[in-house]
Amino acid sequence: MKKLFAFTLAEVLVTLGIIGVVSALTVPTLMQSHQRKTYVTQLNQVYNLFSQAFLQYMNEKNALNLHEAGLTSSAEVRNFMNKYFNIVQSCTTFTDCFSDDAYHNMNGTALTNSSYWPGSTNAPCFVLANGSAVCLEHSKYHNSSYGHITIDINGKGGPNVAGRDLFFVTYYNDGSIDEDNIPPSCRTSGTGCGSGKTNPQDVRTAIGANCRTRSDAKGCFGLILNNNWEMPY
């Protein structure tokens, strides 16, 4: 008679236990990595929408920059958004588009609206067809050289954390989008970047050094740019 070999119940249980331990150690990491990629993909989509719209706006106006094209008032911002974006909702107040709940940084500290929304300039806010909420400040408010865009990549959805789904970015007069407070000379010639800094990457690194704990929503976007659209934090 032939002998039949099989695993014992103890061996099966040991194997299942090992699989369970390995899964418990690796699955959370894989899920976090996937979530980071999802956040960055959604942010990159909004970034591309604005980059293309700014370029098209300047071309159609035969203008060399956004200020010359006329993006200098809240009324023109609304015209710009309605022409170049698929708008689902134009919002009367900030919380019509963004979360009603408080936003936080990654350290858990609550942020006030003034930390990430240029409300003093009455920046118009919108919900885009992809579900993102955005507020666009006109460039004239800052001596025509730049303006701010507040972005929540999933609108009223969570986690409502700066650097995860909330970003406060700067668009410059040439239509480029970058981290806040990078002087024009630094962006074009590497001069005037600040002490010890010789290029925009250095400025982004400095601003983003405390992106987890900042009291505003700045810094994290620059780190993503520096890391080729990867979330390194």
Image (tube, rainbow, N blue to C red):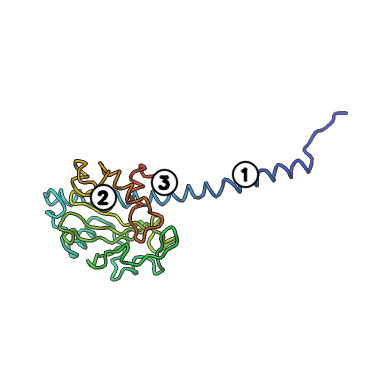
Q: In this view, does 129 lie to the left or right of 23?
A: left
Marking on residue 121:
none
Q: What element carries label 3?
A: loop
Q: Which amino acid does label 1 sit on?
A: Val
**Tag 3 residue:** 232
**Tag 2 residue:** 177
Q: Do the residues labelled 1 and 2 touch (CB within 8 Å)?
A: no
Measured from the top left, where is residue 146 in percent x and y? 20, 55
Q: In this view, does 157 lie to the left or right of 75?
A: right
Measured from the top left, where is residue 223 in percent x and y? 35, 47
Q: What element carries label 2?
A: strand
Q: In this view, does 79 lie to the left or right of 42?
A: left
Residue, x 34% and y 66% (percent of image)? 97
Q: Can residue 131 be seen in this view?
A: no
Q: What element carries label 1?
A: helix
Q: Distance between the residues labelled 1 and 2?
A: 42 Å
Location of the N terminus by quadrant is top right
| Disc 1: CA contacts within 10 A as few (<14), some (14-19) or many (>=20) | few
| Disc 2: CA contacts within 10 A as few (<14), some (14-19) or many (>=20) | many
Which label lies toward us, 3 or 1? 3
> Sequence-wise, which precedes: disc 1 or disc 2?
1
**Tag 1 residue:** 22
In the image shown, does 5 or 166 lie closer to the viewer?
166
| Disc 3: CA contacts within 10 A as few (<14), some (14-19) or many (>=20) | few
Q: Distance between the residues labelled 3 and 2?
A: 19 Å
Measured from the top left, where is residue 104 in percent x and y? 41, 62
- In the displayed image of the protein, which residue is found farthest to the top? 1
Q: Can residue 31 be seen in this view?
A: yes
Which label lies toward us, 3 or 2? 3
> Sequence-wise, which precedes: disc 3 or disc 1?
1
Instruction: Indicate the quadrant where residue 149 lies.
Output: bottom left
